[in-house]
Amino acid sequence: MPTPAEAVRGQLTVVTGAVAADLATEAAQVAPEKSLDAVLAALPSVVSTYYDAAAALAVSWYEELRDSTQPQAVYSPAIIGEPVTDWIEREVRQFQQSLEADLEAELQRMTQEATILAEKEVARGFRATIIGNTHEDEEAIGWSRVARPGACKFCTMLAAKGAVYTEATVDFAAHGNCHCATRPEFRNGEHGPEATVEQYLASAKRRTPEQRAALREYLNYHYPDAPG
């Protein structure tokens, strides 16, 4: 039987999976050479709908976990942030290197990449809502990461020991097909230790080449059996 955290992460996966299904429907309604344009045109409405759904799931879970710790202060979590999709098209267009290749295969690859990035943006609604509320709630001490079974080295390391991220500036550090969720941690609840220096570094949005190399060496040494 899945734990409550695994169940919520599974529900988030269902929401992001619905993004892929809706975008696939849009692509199927046009000729293959127009599929990418159809997907990009549908992104704002599709992502907005499921961003709110993911964020609402986060609010519900936040309230449930918070209430279980018998908090002294009153706080009502809310949806945090709004979806942004213009970055997705910019990222996808970077994959269009040459029209000399098989055009249909190229468009299919770019359409798939757009879908992956759209799922990532929707999942951000869940994560931003959890993390944003922990910044405002005096009963919250931070948040932890819930990785899926078989997660990559990177995600496994960031979720190790139930590490709690307390720094307000730390990023979630999601990648395509990440499928990790966020869990709020509260003063009177059971939680892991504060994140290590290595975990904070891995969550940083920007790293030097030397830091990236050191991180890769650390992941390969400590998590040899995890993929990635």
Image: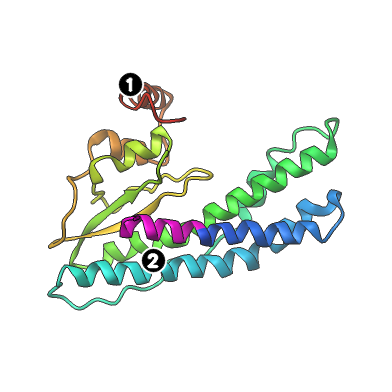
Q: Position of residue 63 (x, y in %)?
A: 29, 72
Give, as a three-letter code, the residue at label 1.
Tyr
- Do tag 2 and tag 1 residues touch (Cβ < 8 Å)? no
Magenta segment, which residues?
1-13
Chosen colour scheme: rainbow
Q: Residue at x 71, y 56 (%)?
A: 24
Provide the secondary structure element on which disc 2 rests: helix
| Number of numbered callouts drawn | 2
- Tag shown at residue 37: none
Q: CA distance from mark 2 to mark 1?
A: 34 Å
Mark 2 lies on residue: 58
Mark 1 lies on residue: 221
Quadrant position of the N terminus in the picture: bottom left
Q: Position of residue 133 (x, y in %)?
A: 31, 66
- Image side of residue 33 versus residue 208, left or right: right
As for residue 45 lying within the magenta part, the answer is: no
In the image, residue 194 above or below residue 202: below
Q: Position of residue 44 (x, y in %)?
A: 64, 64
Give, as a three-letter code, the residue at label 2.
Ala
Q: Nearer the viewer, residue 119 or 5?
A: 5
Q: Residue at x 17, y 45 (%)?
A: 193
- Image side of residue 91 versus residue 111, left or right: left
Instruction: Provide the major secondary structure of the magenta segment.
Output: helix
Q: Residue at x 53, y 63 (%)?
A: 83
Looking at marks 2 and 1 on the same chain, the residue that comes earlier in the sequence is marked by 2
- Image side of residue 224 versus residue 93, left or right: left
Q: Give residue 173's quadrant in the image.
A: top left
- The residue furthest front is 1
Q: Give residue 210's quadrant in the image.
A: top left
Q: Residue at x 38, y 66 (%)?
A: 58
- Pointer 1: residues within 10 angstroms few (<14), some, or many (20+)? few
